[in-house]
Amino acid sequence: MCGICGFVTPDTNVAIDRCDVIKMRDVITHRGPDDAGVFVAPGVALGHRRLSIVDLSGGHQPMAIEDGALQIVYNGEVFNHTSIRADLEARGHRYQTRSDTESVLRAYAEYGESSPQHLRGMFAYAIWDDRTRTLFLARDRFGVKPMYYATMPDGRLYFASEIKAILASGVVRPELNLTALPDYLANHAPSGDETLFAGIRRLPPGHTLTWRNGTIRIARYWDLDLNAPQETRSERELVAEYRDRLREAVRLRLMADVPLGVFLSGGIDSAAITALMSELVKEPIKTFSVAFAEREANELEYARLVANRFHTDHHEVVVTPREFFGVLPTLLWHEDEPIAHPSSIALNFVSRLASQHVKVVLTGEGSDESLAGYNKYRATIYNERAAMWYARGVPAPARALVRRGVGMLPRGSGVQRKAQRTFLALPGGLESLYFDNFAVFSRASQQTLLSSATRSALGAIDPYSAAKAALSRANGAPLLARLLYADTKTYLHELLMKQDQMSMAASIESRVPFLDHPLVEFATRLPARLKLRGLTTKYVLREAMRDTLPPEILTRKKMGFPVPIDAWFRGPFRPVVDELVLGPRAIERGLFDPASLRTLVADHDSGRARNGQRIWSLINLELWHRIFIDGESASDIQL
């Protein structure tokens, strides 16, 4: 894995200082501590940091072919590069290295802007074509690897693997992108193309960007086809094919000239990868797990069960609350934006553990979005169907009476919390049953939370616009397929950025077999009953692994990765809340209504509400301001 950066300008008479791109490059040294390179020519500068995985001696970048007319900086792995190489050599190309970087570059030389369609893997790369004075950027289909960019009024374009590299160029002044705030508050993180930094955007997954003479063109080169004919073969045949395709995805991701391992959580996804990997390698697999000392946040017994079943070389780390909060500012700097999920911290700890033994790990991201692994899909489908019959069979006055009754239940009780999230208390439609129901801060709660000045500045911005746009593109498909498609385009991207940045902060590469695009395309064609069957999620995966995994793993309910922040914010780390949510610096930013913040925290303190995730979002937003906007050093912030 690597870090890439660079810039182009239409004015070739402007002298380019190598130091400018070196500053961008070296702020992301953690992405590639093994090697570094720079290419500078009139109007263009490219920078690269390398984490050597394949062809350790021959993969230096920037890499050139065609007598230097084509230059590439590349981050990722293309797992079909040997077959690409064979095809290109048959077409007359003569390779100089064993690196997949050269296959990506030669694919561009052969196929031009359609070249990403030939690549199977995870990638973000930039190619400078001196023949046409064109910069070509491409990003993999699901956004496993990041790509950010900023454009200037004079036609310049800056790009990088991480936002901090663009900031290091000095051309963008760090400033809150206020229009992205509602999206962040509702969905953990900005879910579209915008970031929280004004003027910095992300290239969407499955897209390319072409810059020429100061003008950019962004094009989609791939998408899931929800109109593809659904599979009609027998259930047994489809389950067998899913297993074979997943096994192939795992096999391809064993491509490396360095040691590999697995992040083993004890859930079915990482357990399936461990099981299939054990069939493909001779030596014991190295597995890595992380947990917290608190019982409700410790799944090590399940990870150990899988490790023992497959005789892995197993390693564990237990994170204390003090360690957790001690690294938060530094990891937020690595994340570039506020850390959406507390589990990101644990991910970095297990990445650091793994880095002592391997340079590559396989992880389970992507299964939930392709196979309906989250409870919210089942709850939404149930609520929508029940709401329809409820509206038909129960008069409006009676429904209003029931809603009032739900509101009169003991505040904060488990019964009330559950009832408030059902058709008994919610209006019909996806706006309330899906978006608001599973938001961190719903539209209504944002109206209370935001200050009057912020509300006035924002106007009627829809925090769900990116997901709604994805749902609109999936019109005509069944509801479950539409929800999975929308999450693949939004929420999955957020999880992948967590995975990338927390692992790269430890200089380790993570690979995601469940996001092998032929596998996901196959899963998209499966009948809904092979994904969600009654109360059983990811049905096809459970059936595919039924004779392989322990029953305790197959029948486990999904837990995500539990982090006991609710208790921490009521207990020893309550002062963090006082400083970063209720403190004068946070209040003086003027984004939020102080009385609403105090109520939010008081409700959490008393147990009337479980506001841990909301408080976490506000803490991280304030830390983000202090580090990126105020310019404080993350290492100087003590929590």
Image (spheres, helix red, strand yellow):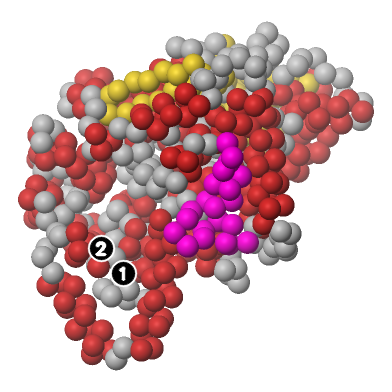
Check if residue 144 falls in the magenta segment: no
The answer to which of 80 and 261 lies nearer the viewer is 261
Q: Is residue 54 above or below residue 425?
A: above
Residue 234 sits in quarter: bottom right
Quarter the N terminus occupies: top right
Residue 27 sits in quarter: top left
Residue 418 sits in quarter: bottom left
Q: Residue at x 50, y 27 (%)?
A: 309
Q: Position of residue 43 (x, y in %)?
A: 63, 28
Which three-letter amino acid code belongs to the residue tagged 2? Lys
Q: Residues within 10 Å of mark 2 (few under 14, many from 20)?
A: few
Magenta residues, as a range?
527-548
Q: Are marks 2 and 1 in contact (CB under 8 Å)?
A: yes
Q: Position of residue 533 (x, y in %)?
A: 52, 60
Q: Which residue is mark 2?
A: 418
Q: Residue at x 48, y 12 (%)?
A: 357
Quarter the C terminus occupies: top left
Q: Residues within 10 Å of mark 1 (few under 14, many from 20)?
A: many
Q: Could you tell whether 450 is left or right of 500 in the image?
A: left
